[in-house]
Image: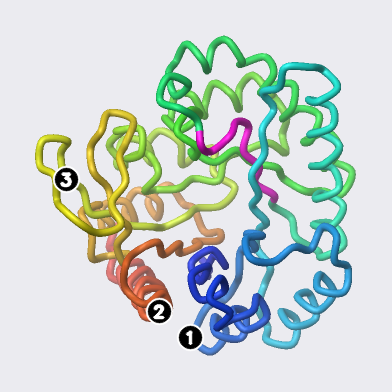
Amino acid sequence: MKVGLSTYSMVKKMKQGEMSVLDVLQWVADNGGQHVELVPYEFTIVDNDELATQIKEKAAELGLELSAYSLPANFIHETEDAFLEEVERLKKHVDVVHRMGIKIMRHDVTLFTLPKEQTTIHYYTEHFDEMVKGCQLIADYAQQFNITTTIENHGFNVQTSDRVQQLIQAVNRDNFKTTLDIGNFLCIDEEPLIGVMKNISYAATVHFKDFYMRPYFENPGDGEWFRTVHNNYLRGAIVGHGDINIREIIKLVKGYGYDGYITVEFEGMEDCQVGSKIGMDNVRRLWDECKL
């Protein structure tokens, strides 16, 4: 098992100009991380070969693995031409991932910011074939590079464990799996323990995050809260500080025999360096303390 960090955890400091993506790599290495997942917010590498090379060389210098690359995508379009344009856009990202030596690439299948009426099973069913076709085309292209493409339980539509499983089964490619995010099940009001239990066998990599949760009838007031599809309240927490049963999830993941990358994502209100450091430390500590 290798603990690392998603660059998304530092997006606030990157947005404020306090850190570059190279600074994030240095910080992760300095704070005990073993790998980094690249999420291209506040930087781009698909059209910046110089930065891609700098990241690859910096990671090698620090002894960090570049574990995965995650980006938004959307296969739901009004025309075939628009759909194929999106496929070609994603293939360019696969090319960059290959040049950097990364072996896991996560892409979405729908827009992240869907209106509530499009988070339903009906929208999922109506557009299922488009999602499957898009995933197949990208997985087939990535296969030549021995890259595994993944769908995350992410984006408010393909987010429950059953929808993720159905998509993986329909795509039917050995190199198409899931980026299993232990917290994102809550965004569509699925119990994380159940989601992890059902989907750990499909996981190519695992995200650890934590949330504070409040029911729809208990408005928690100001803060960086957002609403689930059924209007419950969520706010990012330091891993191990929130309401998700992290210890039992570690028991499930470890008990299954998973021994790959664990990527900490911090989305809380605390300073992101503080939150990320405590989160990585907590995952390592709780993993070591877990007795099967």
Amino acid type at mark 2:
Lys
Tell me the residue that label 2 is attached to: 277
The reply, left or right, for residue 159 in relation to residue 174 is: left
Q: Nearer the viewer, residue 227 or 92?
A: 227
Q: Which mark is residue 31?
A: 1
Distance Cα–Cα, label 3 vs label 1 = 32 Å
Q: Which is nearer the N-term, disc 3 or disc 1?
A: 1
Residue 131 on image: x %, y %: 66, 23
> Split into 4 quadrants, where in the image is the C terminus?
bottom left
Front tag of 3 and 2: 3
Q: Secondary structure at mark 2?
A: helix
Q: Is residue 48 magenta?
A: no
Q: Which residues are magenta?
A: 105-113
Residue 150 on image: x %, y %: 64, 41
Residue 197 on image: x %, y %: 36, 38
Q: Which mark is residue 49?
A: none
Circle 3 packing at 10 Å, graded few (<14), some (14-19), many (20+), is: some
Q: Is residue 110 magenta?
A: yes
Amino acid type at mark 1:
Asn
> Which secondary structure dominates the residues rendered in magenta?
loop
Q: Nearer the viewer, residue 165 or 133?
A: 133
Q: Which is nearer the N-term, disc 3 or disc 2?
A: 3
Circle 2 packing at 10 Å, graded few (<14), some (14-19), many (20+), is: many
Q: Secondary structure at mark 1?
A: loop
The reply, left or right, for residue 153 in relation to residue 194 is: right
Q: Which mark is residue 214?
A: 3
Amino acid type at mark 3:
Arg
Q: Nearer the viewer, residue 267 or 210?
A: 267
The reply, left or right, for residue 138 in relation to residue 165 is: right
